[in-house]
Image (cartoon, grey):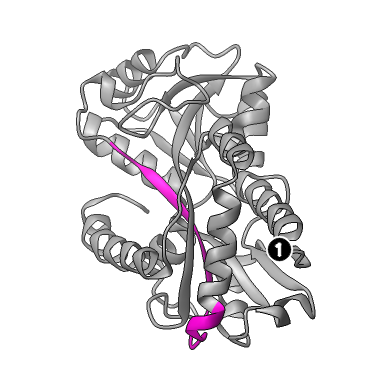
Amino acid sequence: MGYLHDKPVRLVVPFSPGGGTDILARQLADELNKGERWNVVVENRPEGNGAIALSAVARGKPDGHEIILALRENIAIMPLLQPKTSFNALDDFTSIAHVADSPMILVSGANSKYQNIGQLLDTAKNQPGTVTFGTSGKGSMSHLLLAMLKKSAGTQMNHVPYKGSNPALTDLVGGHVDVVGGSIGSAKSFLDGKRVVPLAVSSSERVQAYPDVPTIAEQGYADFNVVTWYGIFGPKRMSKDVVDTINAAINKALENPTFRETLKQQGMVPQTGPAADFDKLFRDDYQALESQLKDLDMQ
């Protein structure tokens, strides 16, 4: 569809620059610019935990020139926890492409007394309320990780919400919080610089990027699996031709072996497939979360 070359395609990111989602968006934009010769421009709109970015895209023209890289947390979890958002997640967007899945990672400071997940859980069980757990904000995937961990392990940890992963990780390095949950992409520079210690990943299987890091499931919680997904959405009423064109371009980018390997080294699992499959995943997950969140302490 040639007209997508006519003017820039804005890829909105509902997070600040430098985080895992921003990095993924810029990498994807580069692939599309090289492969399709589009002019994809990344625009960061972190205000309101992503609600402002999502609202803006929902009100945009359905011509393919404004799309958003959204996560499970801001287009599925947040609207369920904050029902007064100015958009309807199920009705106001068009699902375009499933980009990747990613587990969370639980980390402590390099000099922390918690050097493995067992030590952390023992303290959280035996000394309730003494462990501080930093997240990237209320309603974030790291907040869901905390709530699931508290329920599964029968622990009590104090929630310390931040405005993004980077501030939480910076405070962790400074010794102001005991542990932080976040995406592997956000934590990667801290991990590679040995400023933090990886305790566990939240997926049911270990990840390629850090094969020596155990899963929480390995600690005796066999069904523990907390994974986020990344997807491209546009405004409602996008034509099938536009959706299929963008979907095909993204699938092509994600089938590039070099790009796939880059994402895997960032702890992600690349995904491809038709828009209809992603739309079903999104709607099924939203419905499941609607029930699940009622049983969790996400306050």
Graded by Cα atoms within 10 Å as few (under 14), some (14 to 19) or many (20 or more), the crowding at tag 1 reads some
Q: Residue at x 63, y 37 (%)?
A: 258
Q: Amino acid at mark 1?
A: Glu
- Residue ID at (40%, 83%): 91
Whether 52 is among the magenta residues is: no
Residue 167 picture quarter: top right
Horizontal and vertical percent position of residue 235: 54, 81
Question: Could you say where residue 271 lies in the image, as x and y percent from the top left?
Answer: 45, 50
Q: Which residues are magenta?
A: 225-242
In the displayed structure image, the side of residue 73 where residue 253 appears, left or right: right
Q: Nearer the viewer, residue 192 or 243?
A: 243
Which residue was labeled with disc 1?
36
Residue 282 image point, x, y percent: 36, 64
Quarter of the image that includes the N terminus: bottom right
Give me the residue at 62% from left, 23% from top. Answer: 191
Provide residue 279's location: percent of width, then percent of height. Answer: 37, 69
In this orientation, does residue 234 appear? no
Which residue occupies 45% across, 19% down?
211
**Magenta includes 239?**
yes
Q: Is residue 217 left or right of residue 190?
A: left
Quarter of the image with the C terminus is: bottom left
